Image (cartoon, rainbow, N blue to C red):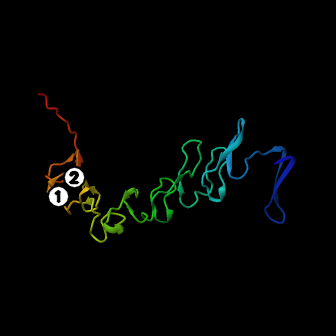
Amino acid sequence: MRGRYVRLERQINAFESTRLNFCEVEIYSCSEGYWGYNLNGGGDCLNQCGKCQDNQCSVNRGRCYLGCQAGWWGVAESSVGDCTKQCVNCYDQVCSQSKGICTIGCSYGYWGVDCTLSCHCKDGHACNRGTGQCQNAACDSQYWGPACNNSCNCLDNAPCDVNGVCPGNKCAYGYGGPVPGVCTYGMDIIKLKDIS
C-alpha cells in the first residue's frame, strides 16, 4: 500500500475521537502464501508458507499466525518457516503443533509414545496403542514377547514359540543369546579357516 497522506481515526464517543495522520506511507508485503521479505534489505518473497491455517504466515520468518493445518506440525527455530513436518502414524493425523506428538493416540497398526513402533499381531489384528500388546493375545509367527516386538531370528525364518524359542534351538546365522534357542541379538561370528 502506498499513499501520500493516510489518516487513521477512532471514534471514542459522540464528542471525542482520536486521530493519527501519516505522511508518505509505504507498506511492503508478500503475496498470500509466501514469505521472505526482509525489512532491512527487501526480498524476493519466493519462500512458500508451510502448511499454515488459511495459508497465512509472517512475511519475514514464515511463522504461521493461526497455527498449522490438520496433520502438520513444526515451530521454526530459524527462518525456515513453520508447519513443515507431517504428523506420522497419528490417529486422525492429530498431533501437537510444537513437537509432533500424537495427542489422541496412534493410527491402526502402530503403538508407543511417538507411534513409531509397528504392531506384529497374528493375521494383522490390532494391538493396544499404548502397550503394543495384541488384542487377540497372539503374535505374528516371526515375533514374540508381551508387545510382540522381539524378532524370532530362527534358522530358515522358522516361527518361534511364545517364549521366543526357535525349533531345535537353531538361530539364524549371526544370531544368538544367553538362553538356548532364543535368538535375541546379532553376534559377531568369526569364520576360522582350517589351516592344514
Q: Nearer the viewer, residue 159 or 38?
A: 159
* Mark 2 element type: helix
Residue 26 location in percent, x, y? 81, 44
Residue beneath the point at 44% across and 65% down: 104
Report if residue 5 is visible in the image: yes
Mark 1 and mark 2 in contact (Cβ < 8 Å)?
yes
Residue beneath the point at 35% across and 62% down: 119
The amino acid type of the residue labelled 2 equals Leu
Horizontal side, residue 85 vs residue 162: left or right = right
Q: Nearer the viewer, residue 161 or 99?
A: 161
In the image as oriented, which residue stretches furthest toward the front? 196
Horizontal side, residue 109 vs residue 193: left or right = right
Q: Earlier in the sequence, mark 2 or mark 1?
A: 2
Horizontal side, residue 91 vs residue 38: left or right = left
The amino acid type of the residue labelled 1 equals Pro
In the image as oriented, which residue stretches furthest toward the right? 4
* Mark 1 element type: helix
**Is the residue 16 above or below the residue 5 in the image?**
below
Q: Which mark is residue 183?
A: none
Q: Which mark is residue 167?
A: 1
Q: Nearer the viewer, residue 112 or 117?
A: 117
* Residue at which label 2 appears: 155
The number of numbered discs placed on residues in the rendered structure image is: 2
Residue 141 location in percent, x, y? 27, 62
